[in-house]
Amino acid sequence: MMRKTYLIIASLLISLTVRAAPNPEIIVVCYPGGSVNAKDASEAMNSMLRVVERAGQWQANSFNSLFTTKSDECRKQIAAKKPKFAITSLGLYLELRNQHNLVPVVQPRIKGRTSERYRVMVRKDKYKSLDELKGKTLGGTALEEPSFIGRIVFAGKYDPAGFFVLKPSNQAIRALRSLDKGELDAVILNEQQFAGLSSLHLATPLEAIFTSEEIPLMGVVADSATTTAKERARFGKALEGMCVDPEGKKLCDVFGIESFASVDAAVFEPMVKLWTKGK
């Protein structure tokens, strides 16, 4: 009798699981050059997706995620999985937007801002201008996307691969310590990395020899050919409450995000023009 009861309960659980997630949608998450631990990121993404499902009133386990810190892997996964939604860098959005019909859904807000600046850091008084760094070593996590750095950060004025000797890194701290020791000539930092500079207590003072214009942060994008405006609004609204939810906050903390904000595609038009001009 007891065995029969267990079998009945098991059958019910299996049927419930099948109903809950018959064919979960894959959310491809691309974090080029990031040092986020894959296990931490996976756990945080699971938390995020469960919050999105509750807030958007989807069935449990309607979504699943695939995380990568490699640009090439991201391109392959988006091409193979053809996700309705993805989390990408700005560079990948600009590169893939036409091929995969990508439109922005929400932006992350970090320290009250939805944009950032990039800076090229050198040892204080070592160089007077970016031009003096020709043929010199440049490190940093952002170098996972050299086309983005050249076309957007440098606004087409410098080709990173041709101008510098690139030394990509998956940890900004490691690159900065190499700069401090004189093993690198310069390091490029995004806004979050620059904000954390003072906590490193480096032996040699550093200064920014170049500061970019304001560049909008990229967050969640959708394939406009496979999603409706209503679906995109539903997904976006669910994300907007993410960081105040106890579970969703785990993801926000991993990436240093305060909240997500809905966005107008027009915000990215100046970046699209720069990207196109650089081709």
Image (tube, helix red, strand yellow):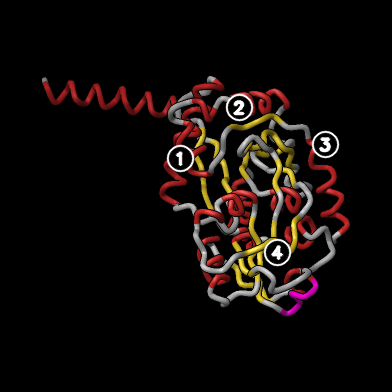
Quarter placement of the N terminus: top left
Q: Amino acid at mark 2?
A: Glu
Q: Nearer the viewer, residue 262 or 62?
A: 262
252 vs 246: above or below: below
Q: Nearer the viewer, residue 77 or 247?
A: 247
Residue 193's disc is none
Disc 1 residue type?
Answer: Ala
CA separation, marks 3 and 1? Answer: 30 Å
Q: Quadrant of residue 185?
A: bottom right
Residue 34 counted in the magenta span = no
Q: Which mark is residue 266?
A: 3
Asked if disc 1 and disc 2 are in contact, CB closer than 8 Å, the reply is: no
Q: Nearer the viewer, residue 240 or 276?
A: 240
Q: Number of marks in the image?
A: 4
Q: Secondary structure at mark 1?
A: helix
- Give the magenta-colored segment's residue range: 131-135
Tell me the chief SS of the magenta region: helix
**Secondary structure under the numbered disc 4 in the rendered image:** helix
The residue carrying mark 4 is: 146
What number is the disc on residue 44? 1
Kindly identify which residue carries mark 2. Answer: 240
- Amino acid type at image mark 3: Ala
Q: Is residue 274 visible?
A: yes
Q: What is the three-letter code of the residue carrying label 4?
A: Pro
**Lower sequence index among marks 1 and 2:** 1
